[in-house]
Amino acid sequence: MSMRRMRLVPLSLRPRERLLERGPEILNLEELLCVILVTGMKTKSVSVLATQISKILRKQQRVSKEELLEQGIGPSKCAQVIAALELGRRLSSSEKMPMNSAKDIFAHSYEILHEKREMLLCFYLNAQGELLKKEIVAVGTLNRASLLPREVFGLVLELPVASIIIVHNHPSGMLEPSKEDLLFTQRMKAAGEILGIKLLDHLIVSASGWKKIPL
């Protein structure tokens, strides 16, 4: 989007202003990239550039200088994107993030907030309640009745996992749990007790917020 067109967009709808007012977790990947890029180019708007880069990141979660230059992005914007991605990787790998509240969980569930398909995201925590790893364990229209515990608890043999948190999105935006959601929660809680892994929370999330499922 050109600067002229951006001025026509109400402040409340611009990615940078929305980020400052409501926090980064409400922005989708394209919007976050728009904030990083700031402006577009003569031949491409910032939203077009952001969409092109996001397609690469959704496939491989990394992007090289060569891939960015192939999109027609100049050296300056290329450096901005690579630096921002590297900063995120270093922080996530060097710090064990606490997961003390539903707000913490929601903030770390940004990957699935804007997805059009249901996804099940699992957080694996150590005995101190610090995040060891998070992983999407199921994608698509979830038939959680047939989802096996080993798909959720598969990492407990590789990491010192003491507890887990489960999050899944509702693409409709509705946050009320279904009967299937409630039954699935109880199945995972029971399976965790057998393995000595505590299920701390199960959240339903959307871009508008979150709701805890009773354990």
Image (cartoon, rainbow, N blue to C red):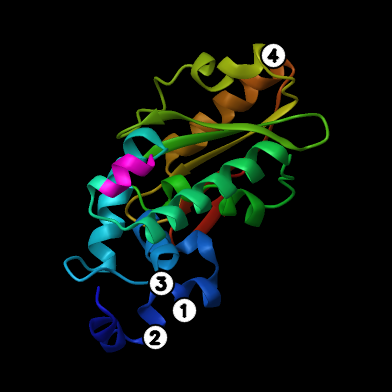
Residue position marked by numbered label 3 in the rendering: 15
Label 4 crowd (10 A; few <14 / some 14-19 / many >=20): few
Mark found first going from the N terminus, 2 or 1: 2
Figure check: 60 above or below 210: above
Label 2 crowd (10 A; few <14 / some 14-19 / many >=20): few
- Callout 4: SS: helix
Residue type at numbered disc 1: Glu
On the picture, is 119 further left or further right than 100?
A: left
Given the current orientation, which residue lies at the most extreme left position?
A: 43
Q: Is residue 133 magenta?
A: no
Residue at the image position 74 percent from the left and 45 percent from the top: 98
Identify the mark at residue 194; answer none if there is no mark. 4
Q: Nearer the viewer, mark 1 or mark 4?
A: 1
Magenta range: 64-69
- Quarter of the rendering occupied by the N terminus: bottom left
- Marks 3 and 2 sit apart, C-alpha to C-alpha, by 9 Å
- Callout 1: SS: helix
Figure check: 33 above or below 20: above
Residue at the image position 58 percent from the left and 54 percent from the top: 107
Residue position marked by numbered label 2 in the rendering: 11
- In this view, the residue in front, 53 or 58, is 53
Query: Which SS does the magenta portion mostly show?
Result: helix
